[in-house]
Image (spheres, rainbow, N blue to C red):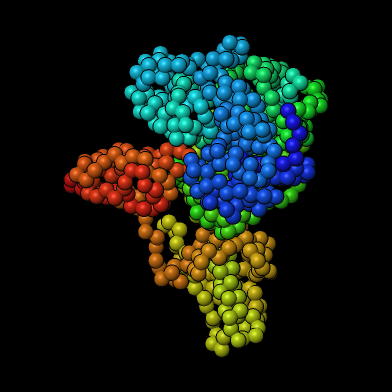
Amino acid sequence: MKLFTSILIANRGEIACRVIRTATQLGYRTIAVYSEADAGAPHVQLADAAVCIGPGPVGESYLLAENILAAAASSGAEAIHPGYGFLSENAAFAEAVESAGLVFIGPTREAIDVMGNKAESKRRMIDAGVPCVPGYEGLDQADKTLLAEGKKIDLPLMVKAAAGGGGRGMRLVHDYGELGNAIKLARAEAESAFGSGELILEKAIIQPRHVEIQIFADTQGNTIHLGERDCSVQRRHQKVVEEAPCPIMTPELREQMGQSAIDAAKSVNYRGAGTVEFLLDASGAFYFLEMNTRLQVEHPVTELITGLDLVQLQINVAQGRPLGMTQDDIKLQGAAIEVRLYTEDPSQDFLPASGPVDLWQPATGVGVRIDAGISTGQAISPFYDPMVAKVIGYGDDRETARTRLIAALKETVLFGTANNKDFLIQCLEKQSFIDGAATTAFIAEEFVEADLAVAEPSVEDAAAAAVIDLNLEYQRYFASSTLSSHKLKNWTMASGLVSRKQYQFGESLFDFSISPVANSADSYLVTCDHSQQQIEIKVLTIEGSGASLSINGSAKLATFKLHQHGQLYCSIAGRGALFKDQIILDGAVDETAGGGRVIAPMHGLLLEVLVKPGDQVVRGENLAVLEAMKMHYEIIAEVDGTVEEVTAVAGNQVAADDVLIEINQQQEAN
């Protein structure tokens, strides 16, 4: 190992920002890399230097090892930190970095090679005596072999990409008749995401907990664990909520799982940070799932309960320094819970979303940590994973961490692109989560379709938005007018000055009449014409993106952002919405897909088009396959009918709401 003074971070987003901050604090020179789509990203601004490595698609930038190494050479970097995702678990990349005379801040190529492949790692763990899930992890990858071996495994079973993680290349099979298509989709997704279509099959452990052990090893032969994290709350096999410690952990079980994790690491002569993941069933039995040979997304919860900086430890170990601690030195204190803020739409089966960041305003406060990789004015690209930030609550106990996290989420504002903030709050407020009883079945068991629907604002929130919107109109008017005083804003020679605002949310129409209260320049009586409900709102302050209001005598804080004329984002107590004034917009409504119009649900690459004009299709039939944000999505027919027109072309990039296919809907007989 050799010493270094500069580090190139071969990643983007919040993890690049996270690594840069620690490296900078330690006195290292930092170099960022970025794609053309990320030119204005925060990690580029944070680093001491930055190098463009190609266009937006990951296959033309972040996944090109030669571009990363060229950036290191041109910038004078002496070490490379891979973050997570992209090349972080690519054994060939680790070897190329070291062959170039640079230090790879991570494990050896050999360890990555073994543990980065679910099939090989499982074979190795079986040999090492680590408990494993029954299944097939053989070398023969022929479809007929996988089909035959799959039928030997009790249902339900899981098809998994051997080379990856994060829910990509995974399919749950409940019927042997579904196995062939599951293999096809998992293999295609795996090849796209990881460059390898190798699969394994495993018996699905129903309703387990997903518990992982953080390990650290130095080059002197010392290996320790830093306790566990419970990552059971997941959607599409991707983690949503993570916490440390596990709510049901006992000292005895922690010791057993910790020792198994250490044994797993030692079996491959591991160095640096790694995570050994287990499935824990209701009986207390646990099974090796995989080992992630890198820093984990959820590492902050471990940092908060141990007081350690895991990136600093990574940097130290990479230079040959000893850990400087033993297992007895690790003391777990307090509790921490992390949620992943995704730009996705829970009401549309968690469909990833791309678009603008009109306002990003993270929470602050005691026991709150936010790791983010976005900023106001940035765009969320369709090329990358939709996770944009992590919000973490910490306290002396789990309940304190939970309540602090909920408060932080309500304070945090992300306007411009659909996101899962409200869903995260719902998760944390579910009684089973409060009780520490969540398993990997949590979302399926606790949420029905109505829970995931976009919530309509209350009449009070809509009235507050109307008053804020009206005051912003006044501000714009007086800023461009020769009139000298904003005090004239509610003045009229006629009596009964009334302003109108009209907002539509689904079937609900908020039709407001807004009248200034006599002898008060900043108080308004808002009447909802439909219900005749009256709300008195006083504007105490309105500045920047914040407003202090009194609503029927109750103090409220609002965060807002003018999206465009007649459209205002507004959030009160964590409840946010885009208020579109139908009067200003002349009653215009957004054109939406319906009937036989099949539109692209998001930006992405169209991989397959499975129908042609004249084809008969039925509701639920797969029409096309779209790749977006590193996942594959089947585009399904919503009606029975005949394909009339196909504008979609496989291999083309499409934008959200592009019309792909027109279906002449079959009329039901009377």
- Residue 349, percent across and down? 45, 42
Q: Is residue 436 left or right of residue 323?
A: left
- Residue 430, percent across and down? 59, 38
Which residue sits at x=61%, y=22%?
111
Which residue sits at x=71%, y=36%?
311
* Front one among 15 and 623: 15
User: Looking at the image, is 78 positioned above or below residue 290?
Assistant: below
- Residue 307, percent across and down? 78, 35
Q: Is residue 131 left or right of residue 532?
A: right
* Front one among 55 and 588: 55
* Front one among 416 and 45: 45
Q: Is residue 235 visible?
A: yes
Which residue sits at x=60%, y=86%?
482
- Residue 37, percent across and down? 53, 51
User: Looking at the image, is 349 positioned above or below residue 551?
Assistant: above
Which residue sits at x=63%, y=63%?
545
Q: Is residue 290 visible?
A: no
User: Looking at the image, is 229 positioned above or below residue 460?
Assistant: above
Q: Quadrant of the N terminus?
A: top right
User: Looking at the image, is 585 positioned above or below residue 2?
Assistant: below
